[in-house]
Structure formats: structure tokens, C-alpha cells
Amino acid sequence: MPVEKIVKLPVVKPIHVEVNRTRDVEEQRTSLPIFYEEFQIISTIKENLVTILCGETGSGKTTQLPQFLYEAGFSFPEGKFSGLIGVTEPRRVAAISMSARVGHELNDSTLSSYQIRYEGNVTSSTRIKFMTEGVLLKEIEEDFLLRKYSVVVLDEAHERSLNTDILIGLLSRIIKLRKEMSDNNEDGVLPFRLVVMSATLCIKDFTANERLFDCVPPVIQVETRQFPVTIHFNRRTPLDDYLEETYNKVCKVHTHLPSGGLLVFLPSQREIMALAESSASTEDESETAVTIPNLSCPPLHVLPLYSLLPHTQQMKVFRPPPTGARLCVVATNIAETSITIPDIRYVVDSGKVKQRTYEFGEDSVSRLDVQWTSQASANQRAGRAGRSGPGHCYRLYSSAVFQNYFEQFSRPEILRLPIEGVVLQMKAMGIVNVVNFPFPTPPDMASLVSAEKHLVNLGAVDPKTLKITCSGTRMSKFPVPPRYAKLLDFALDHRDILGYVIVIVSALAVGHVFLSDYETTNGNSDRGPSSSQKAKDEMLGACSSDLFALLRVVGAYEYAESTDDNELLRIKGAYQSLHSDDLFFIHQSSVLHATLPEWAIYTELVEVGSKKYMKLLTKVDPAWVPLYAPFICVFTKPRDLQNARYDPQLDSVCTRLSATAGIHSWQLPSRELP
Ligand code: CDP
Ligand code: MG
């Protein structure tokens, strides 16, 4: 354990700011466990530069602590210091809704404001400023002393996003700097305090890290009044079908259980919208009133909730549902701890989370994958059902899976991301000396050094100053690993290939484009080459680069997805017929199977599985088309087709065929050829 240093603490002026709250608000506040801890919390914050405040979701941390600080005089401006109370939130929805709630409780909405990336309502009257973590990082870049703030509260620290960890490291330095300057009476600098707030923090990461703070920060634990929540595990764990399982469970809860809101946890926007859309939707896409088919039960008022949903739509979850309807919020882990949705009695938990992960190895690719969440997160999810009364949580996985496959806490993002990307982001924030940076959970030092070298090789970091270069700054804006960002940056100067590079980089970032690769990496390689591997070899063997092969594959996929695309290209060995919108393939019995001629005629079509294969083919010279099959041609200029004769010019005639420009096979015409 680090040795606790004796520090002379700066005195906080004993100011008490009067607040005229409404009776309703006062009553509501007294029901919160944190309300009775105000004295202890404020005394601890006054006596320490860093304080850790833990308490279950709903105990009142986010809404009450900023008010305690305001009333205790932390927002009092002095000299060059405007004495703001800053509160960071990992998500926009929390920053906006919490600032409004605190303004409401203080009975003066001008006192509490928010700032998110592109919008905010901060004015000179603002005393409490809620913001996203990115906003505070930007402000540190502009003023490392954070002169505006007397105290910053880092909310939801347990999420351990990259931004949280970098902010903690930076703020630990700002605390020291302001303390030293204040002790030396430099430039009228006042001390700066930090409160780290969280629901389920792995506390030792902050208290047992000598490099982080000069002292062991005190930890205040707020007790919570929580109604009992009965946990129901599934007997078996669905493999891929958790969406259907979720839908069935929602229907069951709605049709069988007494009134009370329902909160469903799914990993991402895609699944949330799929679940919402599996029911009849109203005109407003974000809001779905559902009556479960053939059952006489009240309507289910379904609302999606995920980070990218416009915030006006996110705010709808706080409103009561229409009279007689049951509220059902389908959310990502956004509803786990950062916001409290009123009157939730039932939770349906898929147990899944979409997380950025990093595959260690030569490839250094990070990707967003759906995985099991942690035990701590699953418990938070369950807790949402017990805020307003006894509740139930339905876990769509077995208790054995929970015990054996769920990590105790979610791993900090900094340990899950490719280190080159982390280093590039830090350099972009102006942190040059990444090796000595006080990370709460430090990554391996040797890998930090090699990441720095890698970025120098990519031209993203200057080899002498180790500062970020112009190219590196542009690269840092792309949410892909630096080596791919370099490709994009290079292509910016070669606009003619930019589109292709974007496709290639997207495919690289997604990873596992080929099923056969996936099979191989998942331990099925001992079965010998699979049929999909063979198909891949045959179709893409001629490509001179695996990246070009990816380009082809994405093009083929795009093509297969579009049904009315007349701009047909020959892609993945697929042919377009004159007589069908379907794609045809050359059957492997044909001698043309390996050579894939550009144009061909076929005499027989067979269907194998979902694919159509052409048999008995003949390669065709495109110059023959207008000569022998003029009826399938549309010419750009009127021509006397009857008099068409073969001549060398016909090649160029073919290039002027508009309707046939992309047609690569046609069936032998039944009528006699001229
Ligand atoms: O931060 P923590 O999870 O500890 O609690 P909080 O967000 O401060 O919420 C405290 C209480 O205020 C909860 O019971 C919420 O239901 C309530 N609250 C509310 O009614 N309206 C809001 N916009 C935010 C919170
Ligand atoms: Mg909170």
C-alpha cells in the first residue's frame, strides 16, 4: 500500500448558499439514502483533494452531490477562478437529463447546465456544469490548470472507458499542480478537488496505485434502499437466438404479470430496433405501441434507448406511458447505471454487451463484438427492477454461464484496446510523454514504447519530439487502428482511389469477412479445406492482393443486397442473366469454371441449395452480340439492325450498348439465328 503523505490542505471558505427548493423536491430528496450523508461527504471532500464516492444506482449520487457542493460554497467565484462545479458523464443522455433534473431540484434552471460535443446551454449564471468526458478532455487541452473549476466530479467511473482513465491520470496531475501553485501563492491559483463517483467500482485500482495520487483517497460508501429483486435464470442458455428468446420473454411478462415497467437489455442499436420492429410500429419510428397479438392485454409502449438515438427521443423514457399501457424500454447498457427510468418492476437481461475488443497478435485489429457482460454489470441490470418496489429479473442465460463465463468486473477499456490506438489518441490530446503517464491501470510499458515506435514508422509521430504530426492528427480522427488510418490518410491525397480504400479499410476493421477464415481461427482447421474455402480460392485466386480480394467480396455483397441495381458488374464469379434478376454461377462441371469468361451462353440451369448454376456453356465474344442477337441490344444511335454485318468496328459498337453493358450471359435465343 502506498504511504499516506501528510499534506497541508487548503481551506474551503465556509460559505453556505441558500436554495429555495419546492416542498415536493425536498420530500423526494429526503427519501434518498445520500441525503443523510451530506455532512460526512462534504467534510471529507473539504479535507481531501481526492474522494471516492460509491453507492448503488439510484442512491442519489449524480443528482445530489453537485447540489451539496453548490450549497457548501464550492461554486463561489474568486479572482481568475470562476468556481464551477464540473460533472462528467460518459453519455450525452445522462449529461442532459441530469443537468435538467438538478436545475429543477434547485428551483433555478439557470444554475445547472450541460455541454455535450456540439450543443449546450452554459451561461454566465451556470454554477454546475454537466458534460461528456470528451468535453472536459478538450478543455484540458485548452487550459491545463482547468481554471474554470473548483471541483470536478467524475461520474460512472466504474465504466472505465478510455476517456475516464485518461481523465483520471490528467486530473491527478492537475490536482498536484494547482496545490503546488496555491501553496506558493502563484498567480492567485486555488486548489482543485476531484470526486470519483461510481456504482460498482473496483476500488483498489484507485486506492492501491502509488503513481496515481500522492495519498490513498478516502472511500465513502452510501447505503442504498433497494427492494428485493428475484433473479430467474434460464435453465439453458440460447446460443444465437437470444433476440427471439428476448421477444418471447417480453411477451410472457407482459401477458402474465401485474402492472409495472419493463426494461430489456440488448447489446446494440441493431438488436434493439429489430426487437422494436418485430412489432407493429406507429408513425413515429422511435416509439412503438404494441398489442401482443391475439391476447387481450393492454398495449405495450415500447421505447428504444441507445447512445446514438437523438436526445429528444431518449428523453421519452422518463415520461409516463399512455394511460393503460405498460412501459417497455429496450436499451443498451446505457440504462444500467447512468440513468434511472421510473417505475421499472421487470428486467429482461440478454446478458450481452457490445464491446470493443482487441485481438492480440500480428493483426492488431480491434473490433466491436457482442460478448457476455460482467457479473457486476448483470447485477446492476437486475437492480433496476427494485427501485420502486419488489421486482423480478429474467436472465436469458443459465446460472452456470453466469458463474463460469462472466468476468467479475468489466475490464478497463485501456486493457482491451490496441495500444497503438490508445497512444495515438493520447498524443492527439497533447500528452507527449505517454510512458510516464499515470494510468489507473497501466498498460505494459514495453508495449507503450513499441507502440510509439510503430506510430513513428507510420509518420504519425515525430521521431525527435515524439509529438503528433499533422498526418497523425488526421489519422487520430478515424476510429480504426493507426495502420488502417494511415491507409485512409494516404488515400486523402489520391482521391481517385479513396472510395476503394474506404471499402478495404471497412472490411479490414470488421474482420472475419470470410466464413472459412473464421472457421480456421476457431479451431476447425483439422477438417481440411472447407467448401467455402475452396469457393474462395476459386473466385479470388486471381487477385494479386488479399486486400483487393476484400474489395471484390464487399462489392459482391453490396450487389447481392441491391435488388434494382442495373449497374451490373462481374463480382465473387457471379453472372447476370438476361432473363432473371438472380445471379447465376458457372457449374463446376463446366470447362469454363476456372477461367470465368466475361460473356457466355448456357443451355441448362440447375439449382443447388439457394444458388443457380449454369451448365453446358460456351464462351462468347462480345462482338458477336449485336450481330447474332440484335434483339437484346439497345443502341445509342438508331441502326439498321437487319443490315448489321460483322466488321472490326463492332467491338466499339458493343461498348455503346447501353442495356447490355453489364450483361455477362444470355440464353441461346430460341429463334433461328440469321
Ligand atoms: O446517481 P445515482 O444512480 O446514485 O442516483 P440519481 O441519478 O441521483 O437518482 C436519484 C433519484 O432521483 C432516483 O430515485 C431517480 O429516480 C430520481 N431522478 C428523477 O426522478 N429524475 C431524474 N431525471 C433523475 C433522477
Ligand atoms: Mg448516477
Image (spheres, rainbow, N blue to C red):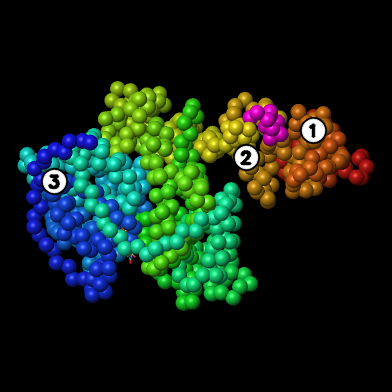
| Image disc number at residue 191 | 3
| Image disc number at residue 79 | none
Q: Quadrant of the N terminus?
A: top left
What secondary structure predominates along the stretch shown in magenta? helix
When the figure is inspected, residue 252 is found, relative to residue 542, above or below; the finding is below
Q: Residues within 10 Å of mark 2 (few under 14, many from 20)?
A: some
| Three-letter code, disc 1 | Gln
Tell me: 509 left or right of 295: left
Query: Circle 3 sits in a helix, a strand or a loop, which is it?
Result: loop
Tell me: 151 left or right of 493: left
Query: Circle 2 sits in a helix, a strand or a loop, which is it?
Result: helix
When the figure is inspected, residue 58 is found, relative to residue 567, above or below; the finding is below
Q: Measured from the top left, where is residue 277 in percent x and y?
A: 57, 61
Tell me: 301 left or right of 176: right
Q: Residues within 10 Å of mark 3 (few under 14, many from 20)?
A: many
Q: Which residues are magenta?
A: 525-535
Residue at 68% in and 30% down: 527
Q: CA distance from mark 3 to mark 1?
A: 77 Å
Q: CA distance from mark 3 to mark 2?
A: 58 Å
First along the sequence among labels 3 and 1: 3
| Three-letter code, disc 2 | Gly
Residue at the disc numbered 1: 588
Q: Residues within 10 Å of mark 1 (few under 14, many from 20)?
A: few
| Image disc number at residue 555 | 2
- Could one spot residue 285 in this view of the protein? yes
Q: Which of labels 3 and 2 is toward the front? A: 3
Query: Circle 1 sits in a helix, a strand or a loop, which is it?
Result: loop
First along the sequence among labels 3 and 2: 3
